[in-house]
Image: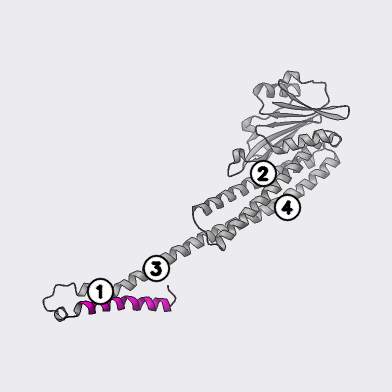
Amino acid sequence: MLNLFTKRNGMVVRETIASVKNIEIDADILWIDLLHPNAEEIAYISKTYLLDIPTKEEREEIEESARYWEDSETVTINTYFLTRPNEEKIFHNETITFLITHNILFTVRYSEFKVFDEIQQRVLASPKHFEDGFDLISKIFELRVEKDADMLEGIAKETRLLRRLVVFDKQLGDEVLEKLSILQEMHLSLRDSLFDKRLAITALLRTNKADSEVKKDLGIVLKDINSLVEFTNVNMNILDNIQTLFASQINIEQNKIIKIFTVVTVAMMPPTLIATIYGMNFKHMPELEWAYSYPIVLAVMIVSTILPLLYFKKKKWL
């Protein structure tokens, strides 16, 4: 599906194009948003506007030269946008391709993003703020970083809550470990997304194709990204600390269990010894002939069990 944004009489008009053949080449086009494009649409746009649209494999390459490049006419950017499809537990990074040629912005994406819906509404509501593709991409990055900041705030709250559960509530178990792993994965994905956008914006600041006003806005976005990266690193350090505390709590609980077993074993040794002695089948054992030998031996066994327990309690081993 193609969403076409055309400037007409000082306004911006949005059209959903069912077929690429319906595109008016001579129109004053501001933005062509390719959502789930098919091979025919990619081929038509590439041929008509002389664009080298990256393939799926090229979009996922991580080399710096594959994330941003430009020639005399075109700027091409592959960058990560965070998404959480179908309300999954963790975020995923989806690569979005931005191409700017002759001041027209082309976006190639295969997922729905609220940021695109919001920026489209802004374009329609305030067309005078969007003169060319660089104005658009600047606002898209600005809005996306705001969304990333909101995500990071939510993750940070979950991180602090998890630390409280481990440190103060002494909660352990598979649920805590699963939550810890999910938060670590979410932070890694968010940091990768921020690093990728920082790379793209840094490169855009060096190009001579964007005007000073766009570069000024991108510079502000870059500062926000740097602060978010620092905040993400702090949260990741907190998660490492939680993991260490979690492992320490488990060791403490295991030590308590081992201590209890040890104390019980030691406390049962004297009565076991007494029972073993009087369980021997020697012929001459005078105690066997006593009238009260059985209750006496039982009493001795009970006392020999209680005394070690009292001693352990006094030493605060219990």
Residue 35, magenta (yes or no)? no
**Disc 3 versus disc 1: distance between alpha carbons?**
20 Å
Q: Find the magenta span and give its range.
A: 294-318
Please give the label number shown on residue 203: none
Q: What kind of residue is marked 3? A: Ile
**Disc 2 versus disc 3: distance between alpha carbons?**
49 Å
148 above or below 166?
above
269 above or below 133?
below
Is 1 situated left or right of 312 in this image? right
Assess disc 4: are there few (<14), some (14-19) or many (≥20) residues with their C-alpha within 10 Å of its C-alpha.
Answer: few
Residue 201: percent from left, percent from top: 75, 42
Colour mapping used in the image: one colour
24 above or below 69?
above
Is 305 situated left or right of 294 in this image? right
Assess disc 3: are there few (<14), some (14-19) or many (≥20) residues with their C-alpha within 10 Å of its C-alpha.
Answer: some
Q: What kind of residue is marked 2? A: Ser
Which of marks 1 and 2 precedes in the sequence?
Answer: 2
**Disc 1 versus disc 4: distance between alpha carbons?**
69 Å
Residue, disc 4: 227
Give yes or no for contact between labels 2 and 1 (Cβ–Cβ under 8 Å): no
Which of marks 3 and 4 precedes in the sequence?
Answer: 4
Give yes or no for contact between labels 4 and 2 (Cβ–Cβ under 8 Å): no
Instruction: Please tell me which residue lies in front, 294 or 151.
Output: 294
Q: What kind of residue is marked 1? A: Leu
Residue, disc 1: 273
Residue, disc 3: 260
Circle nearer the viewer, 1 or 4: 1
Which of marks 3 and 2 precedes in the sequence?
Answer: 2
Assess disc 1: are there few (<14), some (14-19) or many (≥20) residues with their C-alpha within 10 Å of its C-alpha.
Answer: few
Which residue appears farthest toward the top when viewing the image? 21
Which of marks 4 and 1 precedes in the sequence?
Answer: 4
